[in-house]
Amino acid sequence: MRIIETALILRKEIARLRTDGKRVAFIPTMGNLHDGHLALIKEARAQADIVVVSVFVNPLQFPREDDLQRYPRTLQADCEKLSKAQVDLVYAPAVSDVYPHGLAHQTQVMVPPLVSQCDEPHQRTRLRGIATVMCKLFNLVQPDIVFFGTNDHPRFLTIRRLIRDLNYDIALATIPTVREKTGLALSSCNTLLNKEEKEAAPRLYQVMQTLADMIRERPSAIAESLDNARDDLSRAGFRDISLEICDADDLEAVRVNSEKAVILASAWLGNIRLIDCLHVNMPNPAVSETASPSL
């Protein structure tokens, strides 16, 4: 496994591999790797000749400076895991290598905002930062296929649209969200939860499961069920709760012809904002357009 810290060397190494006609898979991460990342790597290993992983804490996608400073940085441990997983290249740059002219002078990429959570100011900042760094990484790595987890559905839709609209010749692959036995989606930030918060965190997924059952059984009662779910999470210690049920393809309100819905959940617990989602096959007919308010 080779660890690369500069874009110049990465370009040269990718060009060398390309001359051999190798199929390149790419997994972008912000480090503090967990079993979810390793599952992505395993799938990438099965579908490509070369696996490239980036480890970069992207400052552009953090609306708050304290969140950026608090984010775990565990590069040495990450590289040990990546070596065991038989990754070929690790790109672990400094901020100055990715943004050599500084953040204030960096061209940024704005994917037209999806409705729903993406209209929130913090989401617009986060998704703009993700779109920008993905463009830079795609241009450097030039992968044939890129892998993402599915617990962050707005991110997935943003990257899918980015690839489509900017004509990247890249396949987008996902695997189901990897969860702890409690149901909590694996996340690099979970290590920042204290004991009490870690015990409360699985409630987010449990509430989504309850909402999924409701959609299948009583789709006309979405508004009432969302109110109950918000109250449930508040009692469990969550705050600034965003909980919505949307069409899975575009995050619009669920329509009569919607085949799949997605429950989008994000909320603060302690100093961490947990993000999760759950896909639901819609009953036929689906709920009406006015039956999926946000909280």
Image (spheres, rainbow, N blue to C red):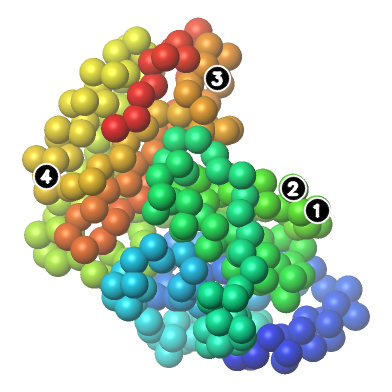
Within-10-Å neighbours for mark 1: few <14, some 14–19, many 20+: few
- In the image, what residue type sits under mark 3? Ser
Residue name at image x 61 percent, y 64 percent? 108
Residue 50 relative to residue 159: left or right: right
- x, y (%) of residue 120? 40, 45
Answer few, some or many: residues within 10 Å of disc 4's Cα (few below 14, many 20 plus, some between 14 and 19): some
Residue 167: give its label. Answer: 1
Name the residue tied to disc 4: 236
Kindly report which numbered mark, 3 or 2, lies closer to the viewer in this rendering.
2
Q: Is residue 88 above or below residue 258?
A: below
| 20 vs 43: above or below | below
Residue 149, image x, y percentages: 51, 55
Q: Earlier in the sequence, mark 4 or mark 3?
A: 4
- Left or right position of 229 against 174: left
Mark earlier in primary sequence (1, 3):
1
Do the numbered discs 2 and 4 sit on residues whose CB atoms are within 8 Å?
no
| Residue type of the residue flagged with mark 2 | Arg
Is residue 286 visible to the viewer in this orientation of the structure?
yes
Q: Amino acid at mark 4?
A: Ala
Residue shown at 25%/22% (left/top)?
225
Q: Which three-letter amino acid code belongs to the residue tagged 1?
A: Asn
Q: Which mark is residue 258?
A: 3
Mark 1–mark 3 Cα distance, whole angstroms, equals 27 Å
Q: Position of residue 161 (x, y in %)?
A: 67, 46
Q: Please report contact status of discs 1 and 2: CB closer than 8 Å, yes or no.
A: yes
Q: Which residue is mark 2?
A: 164
